[in-house]
Image (tube, helix red, strand yellow):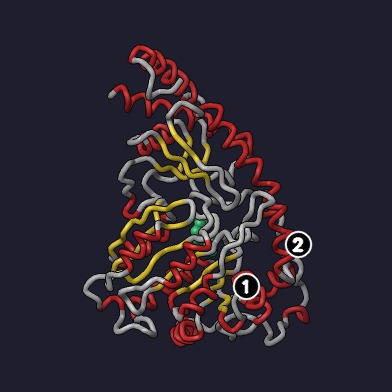
Amino acid sequence: MNLTQASNSELNELYLTLKKQYEDYCCKGLKLDMSRGKPGADQLDLAEEMLTVLSKNEQMLSREIDTRNYGLLTGIVECRELFSEIFEVPVKNVIAGGNSSLTMMYDTMMRLWVFGAPDGKRPWCAEKKVKWLCPVPGYDRHFSICQQLGMEMIPVPMTENGPDMDIVEALAADESVKGIWCVPKYSNPQGYVYSDECVRRLAHMNTGAADFRIFWDNAYVVHHLTEERPVLLNIYDECAAAGTLNRVIMFTSTSKVTYPGAGVAAMAASDENVEWSKKIMTVQGIGPDKVNQLRHCMFFPDINAIEEHMKKHAILLKPKFDAVADILERELGGTGAGSWLAPKGGYFISFDSYPGCAKRIHKLCADAGVILTNAGATYPYGIDPEDRNIRIAPSLPPVSELTAAMEVFCICAKLAAVEKILGV
Ligand SMILES: Cc1ncc(COP(=O)(O)O)c(C=O)c1O
């Protein structure tokens, strides 16, 4: 039944049925978590051999250094080479760091905030106003960084080709707009891949701020769910061609390749940006965890080894994404209670409810023991103007739990839509 075309009596009848189904689920004492994009335990198990590739003193030497000791601020060369293949940028422009790309993004933003960019007039904290472009829906932790610093976040609608570039170009002309978040491949939460045109326009556009920065968070660069391998235009080369190489700072990590708690993160940027980062990092620390970097490089001698490993992840993940898609289609297809995307990679399924229902669905699910990412989390300040978007994270629960959770979710989505239409 299409809820938007149903009569009042049909809706009233459905309301009572759904309420009964919902209450039955509430009595089951479920405890299911679809809130964050964490790998399942079976995925973590895939990296077991990495734990034993280094077991002897004599294996601890990298080409340049004894990895057990202090030093080498930008990481061991083997690791920088590996990330240089992933980023498709020269090794000299890569910094291999600790276990989290989010930390690297935060640190980079803090450096800009406190010290200013190498091509900027002053530290950003000394600017009257700093604005930042936030493609929406987007990644909540990106938004939290801007919010903590008191930047003004400006939402920019996402399209299937990336952020709406007409809007980005218009906004970037304002000199108080200092940058933009981008998750260019399998975007969080939609799974979109930026088109060539979008990448070119980002690299070539005029910006009011000379020190404008694109935070190019390629978190899902090797995280395919299908056989397709979408090619993302290399923004580093585009920026080089446009004479805007300082504009882009790239980030990634092996959090969802090996371990989210014990992976390796990396960033890549222009010579000037790397020198600027290093100068500040020299005071911040003496070097990253090079033992972990080395064991990653022994486990993954090159990018092909990562690609092969990621196929094993896809074998575990794809059935979970398929289960979610099947239940959504079976329960909500044609009802008007929501729409969703079928990503070809990444970690999420983006769901748009009937307008004004996302918060209600979140609450109904929570009361029935199903934890979702907070409604609104995919928007700056947690404010989804249409109260529609919910990010579904299918990776963590086993398929049986996921199925139960999605059944509850679909009942809640229908119940919330019927309540909204009836005004109850
Ligand atoms: C887009 C995006 N960037 C970064 C991260 C976190 O990466 P890391 O574990 O390297 O800090 C996530 C995790 O969900 C993410 O979705």
Q: Residue 6 sits in which quadrant? A: top left
Q: Which residue is mark 2?
A: 49
Q: Which label sits on residue 83? A: 1
Q: Is residue 256 above or below residue 28?
A: below
Q: Secondary structure at mark 1?
A: helix
- Measure the C-alpha gap from mark 1 to mark 2: 20 Å
Q: Which label sits on residue 162? A: none
Q: Is residue 163 above or below residue 359?
A: below
Q: Secondary structure at mark 2?
A: helix
Residue 406: x and y in percent read 53, 33
Q: Is residue 370 above or below residue 188?
A: above
Q: Residues within 10 Å of mark 2 (few under 14, many from 20)?
A: few
Between tags 1 and 2, which lies in front?
A: 1
Say which amino acid is labelled 2: Glu
Say which amino acid is labelled 1: Phe
Q: Residues within 10 Å of mark 1 (few under 14, many from 20)?
A: many
Residue 70: x and y in percent read 59, 85
Left or right, 159 with respect to 343, comes to: left
